[in-house]
């Protein structure tokens, strides 16, 4: 099992990129913003199967299938959301939302906690008794203020 856990830790995990709405990564103070994580094409995401090199497993074919335990969104202002299994979404139904109280530039990121199942030589799947947490790259969000003015013509 130690070899399988080691192989799990070496799995090239898919990266979770944080998307942001409104578009352009610019928003206003107190405006509700929507966040959405999406998986990279590279690496292994939930349900995909990584085949471990048999030479590292005494000739046995070992498959590792990542499972999503949870995501934790960090909004860069000290607030966070999660852990959750939700990838978030867009307006109006996205469930990962946050409003900023002050103007500034904020590094928004998500950390992903992975679990995994394994099988040997095509046998039945079993859970690996360990998890891995991977911090994902940050996206910078700019928060601005706006001033209303009434004017006469």
Image (tube, rainbow, N blue to C red):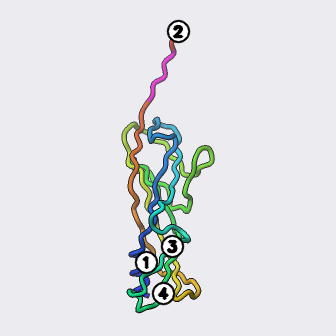
Nearer the N terminus, badge 4 or badge 2?
4
Mark 3, residues whose alpha carbon is within 10 Å: few (<14), some, or many (≥20)?
many
Nearer the N terminus, badge 2 or badge 3?
3
Which mark is on residue 152? 2
Where is residue 109? Give x, y as percent: 42, 54
Does the CB distance between marks 2 and 1 fall below 8 Å? no
Where is residue 19? Give x, y as percent: 49, 49
Dot 4 corresponds to which residue?
61
92 lies left or right of 29: right
Label 3 residue SS: strand
- The residues bearing labels 4 and 2 have C-alpha atoms spaced at a distance of 77 Å
Task: Classify 29 as above or below 118.
Answer: above
Label 4 residue SS: loop
Where is residue 105? Give x, y as percent: 37, 41
Residue at the far right: name it: 93
Task: Classify 5 as above or below 96.
Answer: below
Nearer the N terminus, badge 4 or badge 1?
1
User: What residue lies at 48% left-to-right and 18% top-to-bottom?
Assistant: 149
- Which region is colored magenta? 146-150
Which mark is on residue 66? 3
Does the CB distance between marks 4 and 2 fall below 8 Å? no
Mark 4, residues whose alpha carbon is within 10 Å: few (<14), some, or many (≥20)?
some
Nearer the N terminus, badge 1 or badge 3?
1
Nearer the N terminus, badge 2 or badge 1?
1
User: What residue lies at 42% left-to-right and 82% top-to-bottom?
Assistant: 53
Dot 1 corresponds to which residue?
8
Label 2 residue SS: loop
């Amino acid at each position: 099992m130690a070899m399988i856990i080691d192989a799990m830790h070496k799995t090239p995990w898919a990266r979770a990129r944080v998307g942001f709405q409104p578009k352009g990564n610019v928003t206003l103070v107190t405006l509700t913003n929507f966040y959405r994580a999406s998986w990279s094409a590279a690496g292994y995401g939930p349900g995909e199967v990584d085949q471990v090199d048999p030479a590292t497993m005494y000739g046995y074919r070992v498959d590792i299938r990542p499972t999503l335990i949870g995501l934790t969104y960090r909004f860069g202002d000290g607030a966070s959301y999660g852990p959750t299994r939700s990838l978030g979404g867009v307006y109006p139904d996205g469930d990962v939302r946050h409003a900023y109280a002050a103007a500034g530039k904020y590094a928004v990121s998500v950390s992903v906690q992975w679990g995994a199942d394994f099988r040997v030589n095509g046998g039945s799947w079993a859970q690996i008794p360990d998890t891995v947490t991977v911090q994902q790259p940050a996206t910078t969000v700019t928060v601005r203020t706006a001033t209303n003015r009434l004017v006469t013509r």
